[in-house]
């Protein structure tokens, strides 16, 4: 199976739903975020944050994603403004944090 970047992002986001939303429904996201995003940002994720794979520099950045995933990213992007006390949060940062959180959930039982 050739999974696209957009598909992987959607799976990662849906895997986080029980942690970030009371509805567990990506169409009706009701944030009750239980992820320590600032703590996650500082974590080292084996084979991800310490990767020396030169091919990752040339990855395509265009994503084809479901509308529900797009909306959920927008909700998180707005929430991150408060969490990170920022005036602007780039969508790429939100994507990175969602992927990091999903990976961390799988390998470390996120926010145990």
Image (cartoon, rainbow, N blue to C red):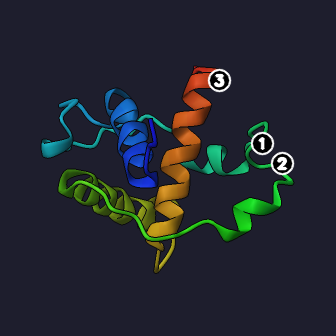
- Counting other residues with Cα less than 10 Å from the Cα at mark 3, is it few (<14), some (14-19), or many (20 or more)? few
Check the image and name the residue furthest to the front.
1
Helix, strand or loop at label 1? It is loop
Q: CA distance from mark 3 to mark 1?
A: 12 Å
Q: CA distance from mark 1 to mark 2?
A: 7 Å
Q: Is residue 17 left or right of residue 4?
A: left
Give the residue number, with chain letter if any, for mark 1: 44
Q: Is residue 38 left or right of residue 72?
A: right
Q: Which residue is pictured at 27% across the width and 43% down the height?
A: 31
Quick one: label 2 or label 3, which is nearer the N terminus? 2
Give the residue number, with chain letter if any, for mark 2: 50
Q: Which residue is pictured at 65% across the width and 51% down the height?
A: 41
Helix, strand or loop at label 2? It is loop
Q: Nearer the viewer, residue 42 or 100?
A: 100
Residue 56 occupies quadrant: bottom right
Residue 111 locus on image (x, y percent): 57, 27
Give the residue number, with chain letter if any, for mark 3: 107
């Amino acid at each position: 199976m050739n999974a696209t970047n957009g598909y992987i992002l959607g799976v990662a986001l849906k895997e986080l739903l029980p942690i970030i939303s009371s509805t567990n429904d990506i169409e009706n996201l009701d944030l009750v975020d239980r992820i320590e995003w600032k703590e996650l940002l500082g974590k080292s994720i084996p084979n991800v944050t310490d990767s020396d794979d030169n091919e990752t520099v040339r990855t395509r950045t265009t994503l084809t994603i479901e509308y529900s995933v797009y909306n959920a990213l927008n909700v998180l992007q707005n929430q991150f403004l408060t969490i990170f006390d920022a005036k602007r949060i780039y969508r790429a940062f939100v994507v990175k944090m969602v992927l990091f959180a999903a990976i961390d959930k799988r390998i470390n039982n996120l926010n145990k």
